[in-house]
Structures are given as structure tokens and as C-alpha cells.
Amino acid sequence: MSTDEPLPVAKYLDLILYSREQINKESAAMGNDKLEETAPWGIVSIKAREIDYEIPMTPITAMRNALGKEEGSSGIPLDRDSYMKAYKYWDNHAVVTK
């Protein structure tokens, strides 16, 4: 796709939600004060896509998630197979912002 072509319109959106409990844990681990927000869920990311199945998270997101709560992440261990699938997908795709 050249830079002169219009971007396709997303057919689907993935809303990535974290529970209030998880948001508070990650905020506390980073030394931030507890947020006054009381909504049970918070949107942490929105991924637009054209395909009717979930795309993998970016490899850097998987790595950041594995850092641990003390680094402000979810602390979910890195799964090598999932990471490699994500790498293979994102090796041929890009996030486009406008």
C-alpha cells in the first residue's frame, strides 16, 4: 500500500479491558497513587482490524506484560509459542496511525 492510497476502514474493533483491580495493582507497582476512578473496567487499548478473528498482541506488548507487576505490567509469563505467532504476524503487518 503506498502512502497515497486511502487507509482501509476497520470492520472490527477489539477493546482491551483491564479490571479495576488490575489497573490499581499496576498503578501501585509503579508508585502511583490509587486512582479515584471506580468503574469496574478500564479500556487500555483499542485495536482496529479488517479480519473477523482476533489478531495477536504485538511482540513488545507480550514482552512488557511479562516484566512483572513491579514494572507496572500484568506479570503474565511469556508464552514462547504465542510470542512466535505474534512475531510472525507482525513481521508482515504494521500499526498505522493517522
Image (cartoon, rainbow, N blue to C red):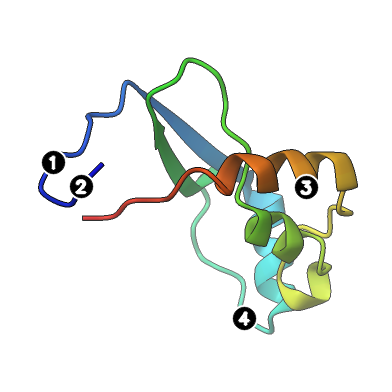
Answer left or right for 35 relative to 50. Answer: right
Can residue 40 be seen here?
Answer: no
The residue singled out by tag 1 in the image is 5
| C-alpha distance separating marks 3 and 4 | 29 Å
Question: Is the Cβ of the residue at disc 1 closer than 8 Å to that at disc 3?
Answer: no
> Who's the residue at 80% across and 40% down the image?
82
The tag earlier along the polypeptide, 1 or 3, is 1
Mark nearest the camera among 2 and 4 is: 2
Count of numbered marks: 4
Q: Which of marks 2 and 3 is in front?
A: 2
Are the residues at dot 2 and dot 1 in contact (C-beta closer than 8 Å)?
Answer: yes
Image: 16 above or below 29: above
Question: Element under label 3?
Answer: helix
Residue type at the position of mark 1: Glu
Q: Which of marks 2 and 3 is nearer the N terminus?
A: 2
Q: Name the residue under label 3.
A: 83
Q: Which residue lies furthest to the bottom in this view?
A: 31
Q: Which residue type carries mark 3?
A: Tyr
Mark before the other along the chain sequence, 1 or 4:
1
Q: Which residue sits at x=43%, y=49%?
A: 94
For the residues marked 2 and 4, what is the alpha-carbon distance in whole angstroms?
43 Å
**Pointer 1: residues within 10 angstroms few (<14), some, or many (20+)?**
few
Residue 26 in the image, given as x and y percentages of width and height? 70, 66
- Give 26 or 75, whichever is nearer the viewer: 75
Label 4 neighbourhood size at 10 Å, few (<14), some (14-19), many (20+)?
few
Task: Residue under label 4, please give it.
Answer: 32
The residue where tag 2 is placed is: 2
| Spatial separation of the CA atoms under disc 1 and disc 4 | 43 Å
Q: Position of residue 58 (x, y in %)?
A: 60, 51
Q: Which residue is drawn at 48% across and 15% down?
A: 52
